[in-house]
Image (spheres, rainbow, N blue to C red):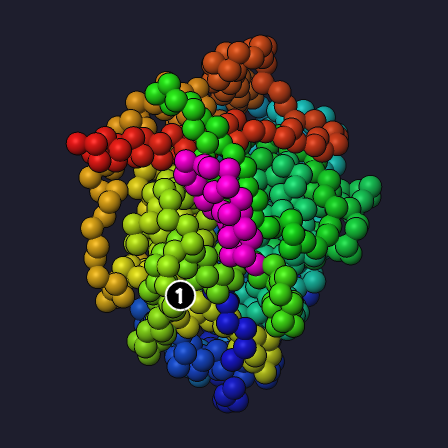
Amino acid sequence: MKHLFPSTALALFIGLGVLPFSANTFAANSWDNLQPDRDEVIASLNVVELLKRHHYSKPPLDDARSAIIYDSYLKLLDPSRSYFLASDIAEFDKWKFQFDDFLKSGDLNPGFIIYKRYLDRVKSRLDFALAELNKGVDSLDFNAKETLEIDRKDAPWLKTEAELNNLWRKRIKDEVLRLKIAGKEPAKIQELLTKRYKNQLSRLDQTRSEDIFQAYINTFAMSYDPHTNYLSPDNAENFDINMSLSLEGIGAVLQSDNDQVKIVRLVPAGPADKTKQVAPADKIIGVAQGDKEMVDVIGWRLDEVVKLIRGPKGSVVRLEVIPASNAPNDQTSKIVSITREAVKLEEQAAKKSILNLKQDGKNYKLGVIEIPAFYLDFKAFRAGDPNYKSTTRDVKKLLTELQKEKVDGVIIDLRNNGGGSLQEATELTSLFIDKGPTVLVRNADGKVDVLEDENPGAFYKGPMALLVNRLSASASEIFAGAMQDYHRALIIGGQTFGKGTVQTIQPLNHGELKLTLAKFYRVSGQSTQHQGVLPDVAFPSIIDTKEIGESALPEAMPWDTIRPAIKPAVDPFKPYIDKLKAEHEARVAKDAEFIFIRDKLALAEKLMAEKTVSLNEAERRAQHADIDAKQLVMENARRQAKGEAPLKEMKKEDEDALPVEPEKTKPEDDAYLSETGRILLDYLKLTSQVAKK
């Protein structure tokens, strides 16, 4: 096997059996004759065997897994239950508990049959949508009291084509209304939507057997866990292309979200991150090369969108993005220009700053070390270069400088750190502990490898806090977990991502299989998987944990424990945690930034809970005005507390505006960083009081 990552051939052939099924009669389409070929059959059998022998959890391929595969496949193809009819599902239901048998025998026909029926239904819906648009968007009645069900993942399958037509008439009406409220003219809306649906129709005609095979076998692979994936030959050359972009691009991790593409996280110091114009959970709806026309990508496959976004170093790509900060029904978009480039190691390097705080009448200096990623210049390291760059070496140097400046304590900022080198997570841990285990890796056979710090003595023994958030993942969680288990630092912020598994790439006769073969455990025996690292003092999460994180992924492997590698020690923080939380709550109850964040999260949660949306223009505009008014009140309360002039209205993004260079802010202006510092100072005060007694 090749490529062992933290974060991230058997040749058999059995002749195809043909399953009888009662197909409805459809007009001939380009995909009607698509069938699996011999290479795909062999690859599917290889995947079955590799998962059986090497997957970490080795769950049986049985009727229960068959049901998971079936339900996941339907969800992949039709997540909003807007294409298939109840009669289609009744026809497919007879296979629900047979996919285990089909896969073991190399029979791919059921997967192809379902997918081709899906293509038929999509074509029918697009034809209907174009016919409706052809009547003119001005013919739509926005005065009627109608609503559209927006969350249909658990809705019943519709029984008749008339019911589907009614749903799609409402969906078209909703799309037009969203664009109308966003400021688009009727003629422009008609042109945009007509082009979108025609493009989707033409893409249906380009469907290949390979597309169906990838969707079906990947659904099977991901029924084991979300990081076990089948990569087609086209995608195999780009590791994990279905989840992330190459660093020589825009530096963003993407995933499909129904008909749109969602940003999961940004690579620190990458081109997208530098713009400060995009954020996790933003949706990409258009891509343009340089100053060329924007291509609408709603309804495109993720890999196709990735191909558009990637390009030569130094070239410019423009993205049309709907910010995650918008209200749920606000389709206002903005255009972000990004110059493609490779992420430079020095730009991901750890950085230091001084956080100056006044507390209880005294002035304090806290050192802040921001670590965007766990990096190691492998090439220089292997070449024996004494000046090779690594996270640990850089942090050690920064700690030396901070100690010379006589700081009262240190904050390690791991926010948005998606991980990186496992070796560096272990090495960094060694700077702060005497010696001992740093992380445990358990393989599929139950064997546990213990990675250790064998060098006695800690480099830095002073007071320390770690600031984490939902996007602190993988190697970040290993380091944070070790710091918590050794009681070496207060962990402050948000629950981390929960990525605690190890993947490998296995070449197949046709494509590749990325499969999970090990799991990380903290020295306390707790897994970092699913649950992540829970902070000692929690901050409100700006990132929606229901949308982003391991626990948000289907079939995520569970949290569990194994035998600890160290004996439990007295926790020096435990006696003070309740007091620290009380002091923190009292402080942030009056803090303008925290009040703003809490109010904004409460509003977003209320809006996300709504299951329907009005198709009446007056009601929809009133709803938008109400949301804008609430956001304006929140924003002006924050501005007033900071001594800034109030706004008369909420600013809307100018979609033609050029990116603005973000203002450089002081550490003291970062509410979360400052509050982390105050919590650390609270702890120092409490321990000092106890010492005096």
Amino acid carrying mark 1 in the image: Asn
Percent x, y of residue 377: 61, 63
Q: Which residue is drawn at 57% across and 44% down?
A: 351
Q: In this view, does 421 lie above or below 201?
A: below
Looking at the image, which is closer to me, 646 or 126? 646
Percent x, y of residue 442: 34, 71
Magenta-highlighted residues: 390-417
Q: Which residue is drawn at 48% across and 65% down?
A: 423
Q: In this view, does 379 lie above or below 399?
A: below
Looking at the image, which is closer to me, 82 or 283? 283
Outermost residue on the right side: it is 291
Q: Can you tell which quarter of the image residue 177 is in?
A: top right
Percent x, y of residue 89: 42, 59
Secondary structure category for the residue under label 1: loop
Percent x, y of residue 485: 30, 54
Q: In this view, does 172 lie above or below 618?
A: below
Q: How crowded is mark 1: few (under 14 residues within 10 Å), some or many (20 or more)?
A: few
Q: Does the magenta stretch include residue 34?
A: no
Q: Can you tell which quarter of the image residue 224 is in?
A: bottom left
Q: Mark 1 points at which residue?
A: 455
Q: Is residue 619 above or below residue 500?
A: above
Q: Can you tell which quarter of the image residue 28 is in?
A: bottom right
Q: Is residue 407 magenta?
A: yes
With 76 as the anchor, is 559 left or right in this view? left
**Residue 501 seen:** yes
Q: Residue at x 30, y 54 (%)?
A: 486
Viewport quadrant of the C terminus: top left
Label tally? 1
